[in-house]
Image (cartoon, helix red, strand yellow):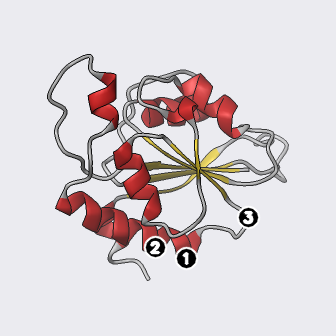
Amino acid sequence: MDLILWRHAEAEPHVAEGDETGDLKRALTPKGKRHAARVGAWLHRQLPDDVRVLSSPARRCVQTVEALGRNYKLVEALAPYSSAEAILDACGWPDHRQPVLIVGHQPLLGEVASLVLAGSKMDWRIRKAGVFWISQKAGSDKDEGNAPYVKLVVGPDFVGQLR
């Protein structure tokens, strides 16, 4: 299974601490819209046809995932007030047969990546509009087994250079 983590692009600042409703309504900035479009177009070409696309219901995530141009499902477990464990549960990691693209938030996506790869939640940073692609396949070497590995980590500036 491939687990692709895509952090939402740059959004308007959050004004009121502790205001979940207002936080969920924040929109992408013009720069965020450009980055979402760039990364979305690139991802569309890279993703397998059978990928499941799941997004946080936050407006900035919806705007980011819409740049992909594929069908997606809003999942409450991907909201900013969720947990890394809830995200992994919602996408079926590591047992689901289909790859999944998760569009979500920091610090949660960094915690998901560290939990999958290192076995504990750490403060790993994923840049705005950045992609962290984790793959897990049965290895031919018995020492490797089916351990997850980093397939790709890329940000919006570099994506524009990839063809």
Q: Is residue 53 above or below residue 81?
A: below
Would you say 88 lies left or right of 37 here? Answer: right
Kind of residue at disc 1? Arg
Asked whether residue 119 appears in the rendered view, the answer is no
Q: Residue furthest top?
A: 18
First of labels 3, 2 by sequence position: 2
Q: Is residue 151 above or below residue 127?
A: below
* Spot occupied by residue 114 in the image (x, y as percentages of width and height): 51, 31
Residue contact between numbered discs 2 and 1, judged by CB atoms under 8 Å: yes
Kind of residue at disc 3? Asp
* Spot occupied by residue 56 in the image (x, y as percentages of width and height): 48, 40
Residue located at (19% from left, 61% from top): 31
The residue indicated by pointer 1 is: 45
Would you say 133 lies left or right of 15 here? Answer: right
Residue located at (38% from left, 27% from top): 123
Separation of residues labelled 3 and 1 (CA atoms): 13 Å
As helix, strand or loop, the secondary structure at mark 3 comes to loop
The residue indicated by pointer 3 is: 50
* Spot occupied by residue 50 in the image (x, y as percentages of width and height): 73, 64
Q: Residues within 10 Å of mark 1 (few under 14, many from 20)?
A: few
Kind of residue at disc 2? Trp
As helix, strand or loop, the secondary structure at mark 2 comes to helix
First of labels 3, 1 by sequence position: 1
- Residue 47 image-quadrant placement: bottom right
Residue located at (59% from left, 32% from top): 87
